[in-house]
Amino acid sequence: MKRTLINQVSKNLGKKILVKGRVINLRRLGSISFVLLQDRSATIQVVWEKELAAKTGDIVELIGQVKKDERAKGNYEILGKEIKVISTSVEDFPFDLSKNELKLDLNNLLNYRTLSLRHPKIQAIFKLYDLLLKNYETVMREEGFVEIKTPKILGAASEGGANFFEIQYFEKSAFLAQSPQFYKQITAGAFERVFEIGPAFRAEPHFTTRHVNEYTSLDAEMAFIENFYDITATLNRVLKEMFERIGKEGKEYLALYGGQMSKVPKEIPCVKLAEIKKIIKEKYGYEVPQETDIDPQGERLAGRYAKEKYKSDFIFLTHYPWKEKPFYTLPDSENPDETCGFDLIMKGMEIVTGSQRIHLYSQLIENMKKKKVKPAGMEFYLNIFKFAMPPHGGWGMGSERLIQQILNLESVKEAVMFPRDVKRLSP
Amino acid sequence: MKRTLINQVSKNLGKKILVKGRVINLRRLGSISFVLLQDRSATIQVVWEKELAAKTGDIVELIGQVKKDERAKGNYEILGKEIKVISTSVEDFPFDLSKNELKLDLNNLLNYRTLSLRHPKIQAIFKLYDLLLKNYETVMREEGFVEIKTPKILGAASEGGANFFEIQYFEKSAFLAQSPQFYKQITAGAFERVFEIGPAFRAEPHFTTRHVNEYTSLDAEMAFIENFYDITATLNRVLKEMFERIGKEGKEYLALYGGQMSKVPKEIPCVKLAEIKKIIKEKYGYEVPQETDIDPQGERLAGRYAKEKYKSDFIFLTHYPWKEKPFYTLPDSENPDETCGFDLIMKGMEIVTGSQRIHLYSQLIENMKKKKVKPAGMEFYLNIFKFAMPPHGGWGMGSERLIQQILNLESVKEAVMFPRDVKRLSP
């Protein structure tokens, strides 16, 4: 007998079918048992009128007859005839999978991650994540981008910043990539449009709800741009398309979080960073501290402004200051204290950082000198600019932060299957 | 004026268009220059009848009129009217991009990788690689698999084998993942079918044409299987579908290597490892050394046998010996010296390793004891088996080896954009 997936049960009214899955709940009422069975497609109630050998958590194969019952969730149930326990628990499950909410605090949710992943509401996060990956891949290809995979082990910690993890690489030291920055620029010089989905590693000792030390970055780089608004326009189009498709395909997962996808405007509002700081001060009385470009509270208020003024969950902040941006960021030709660098804020949190890059060799070397960046270890990168690079730029987008903002999760760690932070290396 | 991509030129006969790209060749015949211009879509010849300011390697914007010319490659050319050099070289390019073949030895090809990527024949490798990723992602989703991303930084080097790279992780030691093995098993317990595309790190001091120390692994794990032939059958179906689609979509890239995609049989032949050794000895007079399960020469001859006997580029070798396989591999119930482990050989080289895993807690613990594997550091993994795991198994497929075998490349390093080996950490 061939297995029927639970989401196909309704097409088999009256028939005898074989289903396989996990017993996630069991209620006994006198001589009758009600079994809630879960497989990868859905859950269904099984009515069992004899002695039952299975218990909660078990993996079973079950043969039964499909019945219609208005009282059952989804209007169908199975009248169980034969059951075979394939695999059983040797310990009691530490929490109740049949409740709509797991009610574990973040620490326990993550400590028990290998088991909490069996809860339908937790699964919904990662099924939505799957849709995010799928639609990024698909839409980027539709936009003419080529998918690349670049090395995560680097010979030098050269990109700027001290937040690199060091590796013992045979007889040498090496470093884990913070981003595919150099490689996506190099390949944009050959393929014009490239994207990568890969891990990024940051040795930042953060304890926040928006940082992890290993995350999955959705990167892109595009050449032959006129200016950096070509980048923001492409990203705008990609996000709009992605969000619409995820909204359709992910309806049932979004519903578990009482939400839907944000509407991405056809033109996401674009405000200069210096300008938004003034607006925030005037409208909300908050002054962004001098020593930072913008802080989390500033981002929240920028998000609030976007919502109030433009009814938008998104806002581009542009022209980040020269002194805060890496050496490869193109300075603004009209005001060299500012750059063609931008962030995208969604619901008050940065989810994308991007910029147009310097593409002329002499300008790049000059900018490095001004910033006191040493070329050691990045000769392979600087070298490409000797051989004519097209104007180009791109972005890095935090995939888990996107999910966090879509589902309004309190911590980004809820959106990472097995998160890594300063204290957490397991599971 | 809006940019026209070069592959759209033929649709603009007689019209004046704007193209952008790189000059990859330049010939001057008296007062006329012939410019070969490359963009992300194609190359085209531009005829220029005046003084020309551009040189080979330059990034240019060019306005010209589309003409038909039987002598031109692709039957169309552009009669150039205006040209603007956007970006120019400050040094002479180290080799000639206009030749059909680059003729660099492997070491130079890789040393110059940032520039050799601009050659159309090298680009074809990575455009085909893009198609490989695309079609793996697509077909796996069609088969009901959920895409996951699992951590590459591990708290313990627990999976077996000593070939782990060590990281300094804040105050602790950590390790780079050799594979997502534990995580894909854990998630198969929740989602039934999962796949991952991600980097795998192997600290093996190999100097071969088939090893790199960082590669991109196409992983999968599936639950509720009857036996391991469910895994090989799924993989067979996935590969067949992928190969057919890549064959259609990648025709022009394959043509540059004088090839086409192998035909994947509806049922890839399946031979026990012990059996193939006998066959190889009888037919080809080669004895696989005692101390290994199978060596490269054995794989080559297994491939030859598959071709001669079954006209197949593929052959599954099954029932790998218990002593050679990791502790989680399910022993064969009929012969405990063998396992439900298999390799897939393509054109005489292993491209996939897979197996059914042990899913019962007691059996797993017993097998670990027999193999003298200590549980330290993998409690999070062992723990899931206490809570009823379904029968499951999966595979890991080397994406770059697949490309190597499809295009008959001499070294797998040609199929990695920026390969890492014992000596190579740059570019």
Image (tube, coloured by chain):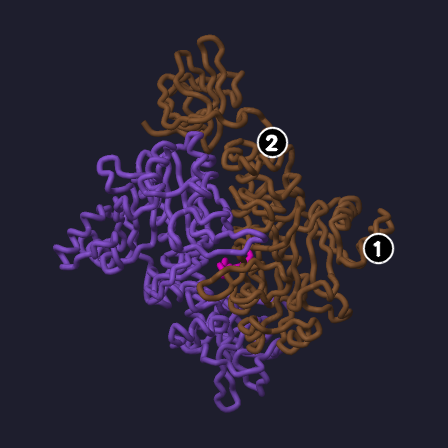
Chain colours: A purple, B brown
Of the 4 image quadrants, the one containing the N terminus of chain B is top left
* Rendered location of residue A353, percent (x, y): 34, 49
Dot label at residue B104 = 2
Callout 2: SS: loop
B423 vs B89, left or right, is: right
Asked if residue B196 is positioned above or below residue B68 in the image, the reply reads: below
Q: Nearer the viewer, residue A37 or B408?
A: B408
Q: Earlier in the sequence, mark 2 or mark 1?
A: 2
Mark nearest the camera among 2 and 1 is 2
Chain of residue at mark 2: B
Chain of residue at mark 1: B
* Rendered location of residue B419, percent (x, y): 56, 45
Crowd tier of the residue under label 1, counting other residues whose Cα lies within 10 Å: few below 14, some 14–19, many 20 or above: some
Magenta run includes residue B79: no
Dot label at residue B278 = 1
Which region is colored magenta? B143-152
Taking the spot 33% from the left edge, 42% from the top edge, the residue there is A329
Q: CA distance from mark 2 to mark 1?
A: 41 Å
Crowd tier of the residue under label 2, counting other residues whose Cα lies within 10 Å: few below 14, some 14–19, many 20 or above: few
Discs 2, 1: same chain: yes
Say what amino acid the circle numbered 1 marks.
Lys
* Rendered location of residue A306, percent (x, y): 22, 53
Callout 1: SS: helix
Cβ atoms at labels 2 and 1 below 8 Å apart: no
Please tell me in which quadrant of the rendered image residue B383 appears: bottom right
A412 vs A316, left or right, is: right
Q: Nearer the viewer, residue A174 or B366?
A: A174
Say what amino acid the circle numbered 2 marks.
Leu
Which secondary structure dominates the residues rendered in magenta? Answer: loop
